[in-house]
Image (tube, grey):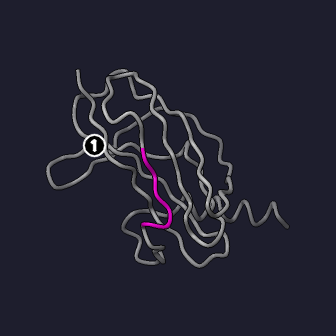
Amino acid sequence: MQHVLATTLIVLLGCAAAGDSDQTAMPTAEVAMSVEPSNATAGDSLTLTLSNESSGPVGYNLCSSRLERSAGNDWEPIRENRMCTLELRTLPPGEQTTYSVQLPPTIEPGEYRFATNVEMLDGTARNLVRSTTFRVTE
């Protein structure tokens, strides 16, 4: 039964997108993502930190976080060739987790952030969580 639940949650997390009207948003302050360092160069390794200050566990997979670049008033996704397993991890309330990710070697200078899907494991909410921004310099 747990395998079926995990598979279902993986599918739900994979299908969730920023503009989905069927998403039930959790308050953004409850689950947050940050990135360090705030300044990087092409090929650098960054650390994503996901913090869960909600009242229940959340499902996540930081490997599948997408990279976005600031384009004026919009954000555009950046294609990456990162290989990830389709596993769903659980982050208990009051805890945080980290994940190391390497920037593409050909990334252009600019302002960036990461976005990842998280879901309350009780099924009450899912959301796209965006990281703090960071700058890529030459």
Q: Residue at x 58, y 66 (%)?
A: 119
74 or 7, nearer to the observer = 74
| 56 to 66, vertically: above or below | below
Using residue 124 as the reference point, say whether residue 77 is left or right of it.
left
Quadrant where the C terminus sits is top left
Quadrant where the N terminus sits is bottom right
- Dot 1 corresponds to which residue? 69
How would you rate the neighbour count of disc 1 (Cα within 10 Å): few for under 14, some for 14-19, many for 20 or more? many
Using residue 5 as the reference point, say whether residue 74 is left or right of it.
left
| 27 to 92, vertically: above or below | below
Please say whether residue 125 is one of the residues in the magenta stretch. no
Position in image of residue 132 (x %, y %) = 35, 49
Q: Residue furthest left?
A: 72
Q: Residue at x 51, y 45 (%)?
A: 49
Position in image of residue 54 (x %, y %) = 56, 69
88 or 100, nearer to the observer = 100
Position in image of residue 63 (x %, y %) = 56, 42
Q: Where are the magenta residues, as a range?
A: 29-34
Helix, strand or loop: magenta stretch:
strand
Q: Residue at x 65, y 70 (%)?
A: 56
Q: Residue at x 59, y 65 (%)?
A: 12
| 24 to 128, vertically: above or below | below
Q: Residue furthest front?
A: 94
Find numbered disc 1 in the image and state the secondary structure of the residue it sits on: strand
| 86 to 37, vertically: above or below | below
45 or 61, nearer to the observer = 45
Position in image of residue 31 (x %, y %) = 50, 62
Total number of numbered discs in the rendering: 1
Identified by mark 1, the residue type is Arg
